[in-house]
Amino acid sequence: MWSNTLMPNDVAIRVQGLGKRYRLGERRGASRTLRETIMGFPGRLLRRRGARDDTLWALKDIDLEVKRGEVLGVIGRNGAGKTTLLKILSRITEPTTGRVELHGRVGSLLEVGTGFHPELTGRENIYLNGAILGMRKVEIERKFDEMVAFAEVERFLDTPVKHYSSGMYVRLAFAVAAHLEPEILLVDEVLAVGDAAFQKKCLGKMGDVARDGRTVVFVSHNLGAVAGLCSRGLCLDGGQTVHSGSATEVVASYVRSGAQGEPSDLARFRLPGVGREVRFTSVDLVCEDRRSVRCDEPLVFQLQLESQHGFRQLTLAASIFNSLGACVGTLFARRVFDVPPEQRVDLRLRISDLSLAPGIYTAGFSLGRGDERGARHDLDVVIGTPTFEVLGLGEATNISVWNPSWGNIVIQGSTLMVTVPEAS
Amino acid sequence: MAVPQAPAPEGVRAGGAPKTVIEPARGWVSLRLRDLWEYRELLYFLVWRDVKVRYKQTLLGAAWAILQPTLTMVVFTIFFGRLAKIGSEGVPYPIFSYVGLLPWTFFAQGLTQSSNSLVGSSHLITKVYFPRLVIPLATVLAGVVDFALAFLVLLGLMAFYGVVPTVAVLALPAFFLLAFAVALGAGTWLSALNVEYRDVRYVVPFLVQIWLFVTPVIYPAKAVVGKLQELGLPGWLYGLNPMVGVVEGFRWALLGIGTPPGPVIWASVAVTAVALVAGAAYFRRMEKTFADVV
């Protein structure tokens, strides 16, 4: 304890040999009845001698050290153990083996709006939710106005939150969460909610937290956010550490491994309130390894659409986002197309001459009507997938090392004239 | 991409770092009551939420806290007092049964609601850490408001019938504490069991019903104690039902009838203490799996 207070830059989280075993059938949603326990008794006696094939190690042999002020991004596909790790760190569930040491006050955000009660007003929920997240009453009172301003719900403070729109609800919930100021913050995917503008605001707030020198563990499917916000990365698969190192390195190797993004994951990237009548069913990057392109190559996307009742006169728009979530550019495809009822439609979008600088990017797609010249109406929007890496190996561009501070576009086609005025 | 890594500000560490160690717990663990104290503000807000929500969408609001025991008292008076002519130790039957119903209603509500409390709070348990004991404790505490409201009716009844309490009334808080402890003790057991075995949900209403009949709410305890002694058994055996001590204590403190503190009441106190400590220990032991099972 003494050494911690004396050295500002030492370890905030130390994890040794951490493991979590679930007995299958004991996981969430599988509560037993008394009858099952009684009837299962003879079976358990027999099984005790046999192989323990009814157990699952959700996490195994995890060793980890996070220094004070570091932001650790944890990535990996579904079921890799990311959430289990977070749940153990936040003391929600106990590990089966190993040991964790946390130095500092811990706050966890596994969900926004935990404990929000629909019958209570916005004001009442701020206090309730704040207390649940571990804030003191005086702390909530002090930050109250700031939270309300952040959420932009001043006028509805005394309205029960059940009358809130989903956007307002999420904003209020996040406002409370964003003002949690523990020394160690554990965050799970909470940014995957709300509209794009609000997500960006939240990402900004996360960045502030990181700059404040607090320790953050951030679990996300948004690889761009991990690469942009985190200093260190941890990639899990099957409950074990696959890769640990700098965040960009870990994200890049994960992207290269092609392990990300099962098709069913698309809903995770969909904005709320769209995708009802017509929707994307898959969104992929077409290239040799599906995950990376050279910076002089065109980007080709393969998209699939479906609609139950059919739709006419649709257009596609696409955007590219950098690893900080900022939009690098957008295109509106000129081609107008129809989607017949209950039939798949394949789209192939080719973007040439993009001149993207080396780095990690994500794409976003919108299906709708209208374009940049008039009011565009979106019918489905997915943002944040696929994630791809632009490699700096283009011979034409002659880039080997691109400094991130140079931006995201390799501006080409410039002309430089040099004249030396003669001294007269 | 290089993210500028800020050095930790010096101010953050000033108070010394609270160190948390997470390790798999084996066997019985300590009750960690200090941890509970740390989370007293959360406890306060959960109680406040329960009270607020309970009456927010009901037409009669807080009036329910009064109506429930009052109407039950009326029904009891008509059927047991008038028709069955059950003795009431010299005081009017309405006040006799109401004094019993007052702690009984508090206990029955506390037991029913706390036994469902953990399952009903699964959204909290799986998402955030706090000592889980806070949940059943908050539910029982929220019932105190109802109790206070129902107590006002008792004051009215006592004024109406001209019942003046003796100095024994000073012991009333102790008996209320006993009622609280019985509700909490039973509530911790049942809420923890309910997480694992949803059968509890069906058992509780039945349990409460049976428990009412073996508790001297409708009839005086003397009837049972007398019967026990006739059989050559000690009367305090009846006190093993801790609610006997509570109801009799209430009658003694408020009306000067019932059982004065003695073997019956001490038996109830002893049973309650054992149930409360064992319940809390069982709860703490099961606590670590709540988030996985609920």
Image (cartoon, coloured by chain):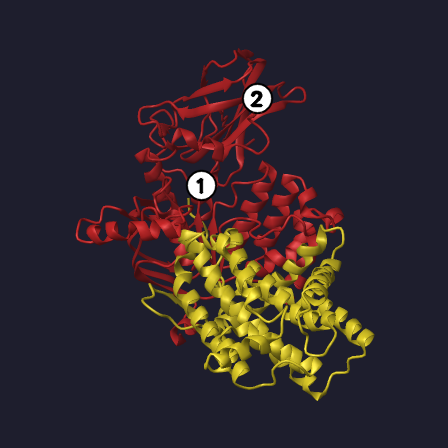
Chain colours: A red, B yellow
A350 up-or-down from A359: above or below: above
Residue at the disc numbered 1: A404
Q: Is residue A137 visible?
A: no
Nearest the viewer among A264 and B89 is: B89
Q: Which structural element holds mark 1?
A: helix
- Packing grade of label 1 (10 A; few <14, some 14-19, many >=20) is few
Instruction: Pinpoint residue A423: horizontal percent, then vertical percent.
Output: 54, 32
Q: Are marks 1 and 2 on the same chain?
A: yes
Q: Residue at x 59, y 44 (%)?
A: A201
Q: Which structural element holds mark 2?
A: loop
Instruction: Pinpoint residue A288: horizontal percent, then vertical percent.
Output: 31, 24
Kindly indicate whether the residue at mark 2 contacts the one at mark 1 (C-beta within 8 angstroms).
Answer: no
Lateral position of residue A293 relative to residue B100, left or right = left
Lateral position of residue A382 relative to residue A125, left or right = left
Q: Locate the N terminus of chain A and report the quarter of the image it occupies.
A: bottom left
Instruction: Pinpoint residue A62: horizontal percent, then vertical percent.
Output: 30, 54
Q: Locate the C terminus of chain A and report the quarter of the image it occupies.
A: top right
A288 up-or-down from A345: above or below: below
Quadrant of residue A220 in the image?
top left
Identify the amino acid type marked 2.
Glu
Q: Which mark is residue A116?
A: none
Identify the amino acid type marked 1.
Pro
- For the residues carrying marks 1 and 2, which lies nearer the camera in this image? 2
Residue at the disc numbered 2: A277
B223 up-or-down from B287: above or below: below
Nearest the viewer among A327 and A104 is: A104
Q: Earlier in the sequence, mark 1 or mark 2?
A: 2
Question: CA gap, disc 1 to disc 2?
Answer: 40 Å
